[in-house]
Amino acid sequence: MSEYLFIRPNLSMPRDYCWFAYDDVSKNIISSGHSDTVEGLAQTNTGSPERSVVLLYPASACIYRNISFPGKLKKSAYNSLLYVIEDDLAEDVESFSVRVLEKQGNDYSVLIYRHSQLRSLEKALELLGLSVDIIVPDVLTLPLPDKNQTEFTGYVMKFNDVWLGRNGKNS
């Protein structure tokens, strides 16, 4: 598959969905645009329904943390890391899910997100015929520093009226 449809939703009001179609072979953006509704996105993929769909989930809807947890955790028990930072969350722990980005010893670099929010967006796209193949936080698409960059402080990019920033491998 050489073509991808990237979709980045604005999860706050007013809702807005930015999208662009990218050809990996020619390394060009084929088309791009905005839609005020999720239904409007269905028309973006009519010419190439075989495109892989990539959802660029807004970093503003994610929490990045480093959590120390004594003992060993199986992958199926990663959500138990939420109980370590339960007091920091403004909502019930059951509303969130965890993805471990990196593990070193007892230290976990994690991404925390509201699973119902992400799943409802994914389900809405699927109902329109847009099957989501990849979900990645938008800021993690910014480049990583080169190993030779000793004075790296981060990368920032303005996307519409939002500044995206990346200051490390998992943050």
Image (cartoon, rainbow, N blue to C red):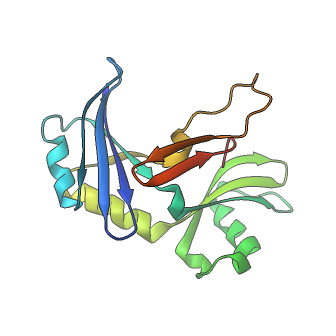
Image quarter (top left, top right, bottom left or bottom right) of the N terminus: top left
Q: Nearer the viewer, residue 106 or 170?
A: 170
Asked if 24 appears above or below 107 in the picture, the reply is: above
Quarter holding residue 161: bottom left
For the question of whether residue 120 can be seen, the reply is yes
For the question of whether residue 1 can be seen, the reply is no
Q: Residue at x 42, y 63 (%)?
A: 118
- Residue ranking furthest to the top: 26
Quarter holding residue 99: bottom right
> How many numbered discs sit on the rendered protein?
0
The percent coordinates of residue 58 (x first, y second) are 47, 56
Q: Nearer the viewer, residue 67 or 88?
A: 88
Q: Is residue 16 left or right of residue 157?
A: left
Asked if 121 appears above or below 131 in the picture, the reply is: below
Q: Residue at x 18, y 44 (%)?
A: 44
The percent coordinates of residue 106 (x first, y second) are 84, 54
Q: Is residue 162 left or right of residue 27?
A: right
Q: Residue at x 48, y 46 (%)?
A: 158
The percent coordinates of residue 169 (x first, y second) are 68, 41
Q: Nearer the viewer, residue 47 or 36?
A: 36
Q: Is residue 164 left or right of residue 111?
A: left
Q: Residue at x 48, y 67 (%)?
A: 115
